[in-house]
Image: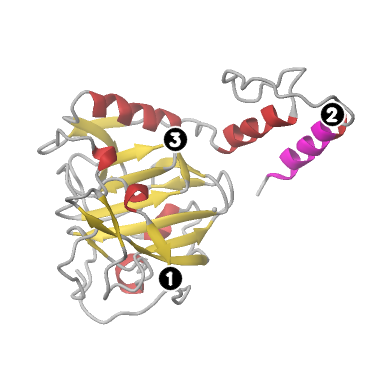
Amino acid sequence: MDIRRRSWITGPGGLGAIGGLILFTLHGLAGAPASSPPVPSPAPSGTVEAEATYRVFLPLVLRSICAPIPGVTYEVFPVINPVSFNVADNPDYNLLLLGYVPVNEYKGLVDYDGDFDPNAPQLRFLFGDHRIPVILNTYKSNGWDWERHQRLPPPPGWPPVSVVGFAVSPGEILYLPDSGYRIGADFQAHVLYADENQITLKYTAEDSTVWGYTVYITNLCVEPSLLALYRQWNAWGRSRLPALRGGQPLGRARGTQIDVGIRDNNVFMDPRSRKDWWRR
């Protein structure tokens, strides 16, 4: 584990064909009378009505980026001490609720002194090619006023960066970062929280961020069946939650950047740290 912890807790590729289809659709609509059609009901992926307009087509593009991942299945696994509160309203679970702000820091891996955990999650396994990705942006997470339930400015001090924006291709499949930990059987992490834009992964079986590693990923489309499974068991009291194996697909990049943060025992760490998260 990194000795630089502090005691404070706080807590956007293959779209060429799609672009061409959009241009074709717009050309076909040239000269058509302006109108404000009603928002359509969701249609099966790839289905376009003959009378479709430009407004209707863009959500279909998004649905193709966020398409289900073929062949995946997911399971649930028991949770230790499931919480009873609404985790969507808790910034320890919901990173987008907590929020983060841009900081002008080095956009590359950095070297820190100190110990490291050989079993820590390795972030290169987020990507199918196991690359060290280009860092597009650096951020620092906000603080949190628990009494007023609102954001505070980012706390001073270490780490200088707590959330990093990695370059990705829209629709790129993302995977659970591999670690040396198991929550039971061959599962490595629970899905502690998920919505349409983010996922929170916990590398211990407790329903809490207090102990162990918590990895946050935002700006992604969580795999639809995984999201549905999470919502089902969350509504049923969280006695079990979806559990993932190392390298198991968890969703697709929504655009050209995903944002990633990581906590160790509830303390935000620097995702750029080579010795901790990029050793292999």
Q: Quadrant of the N terminus?
A: bottom left
> Which one is closest to the eye, mark 3 or mark 2?
2
Distance in Å between CA atoms under marks 3 and 2: 34 Å
Q: Position of residue 107 (x, y in %)?
A: 48, 73
What residue is pinned by disc 3? Answer: 223
Extent of the magenta region: 15-26
Instruction: Name which residue lies at 19% across and 31% down.
Output: 238
Query: Horizontal and vertical percent for residue 227?
Result: 38, 32
Q: Amino acid at mark 3?
A: Glu
Circle 1 residue: 103
**Can the viewer see residue 121 in this picture?**
no
Residue at 41% over, 62% down: 101
Q: Earlier in the sequence, mark 3 or mark 2?
A: 2
Q: How is the image coloured?
A: secondary structure
Q: Nearer the viewer, residue 72 or 221?
A: 221
Residue in the foreground of this view, choosing between 221 and 140: 140
Where does residue 184 sit, x and y in percent of width and height? Answer: 17, 41
Residue 158 falls in image quadrant: bottom left
Three-letter code for the amino acid on which mark 1 is drawn: Val
Secondary element at image label 1: loop
Q: Regarding mark 3 in the picture, which secondary structure is present there? A: loop
Q: Nearer the viewer, mark 1 or mark 3?
A: 1
Outermost residue toward the right in this view = 31
Chief secondary structure of the magenta portion: helix
| Image marks 3 and 2: residues in contact by CB distance under 8 Å | no
Against 112, residue 85 (above or below) is: above
User: Mark 2, residues whose alpha carbon is within 10 Å: few (<14), some, or many (≥20)?
Assistant: some
Residue 23 is a magenta residue: yes
Which residue is labeled 2 in the image? 29
Tell me which numbered mark, 1 or 2, is placed earlier along the sequence.
2
Residue at the image point whose x is 47% and y is 61% from the top: 165
Q: Is residue 150 left or right of residue 27?
A: left
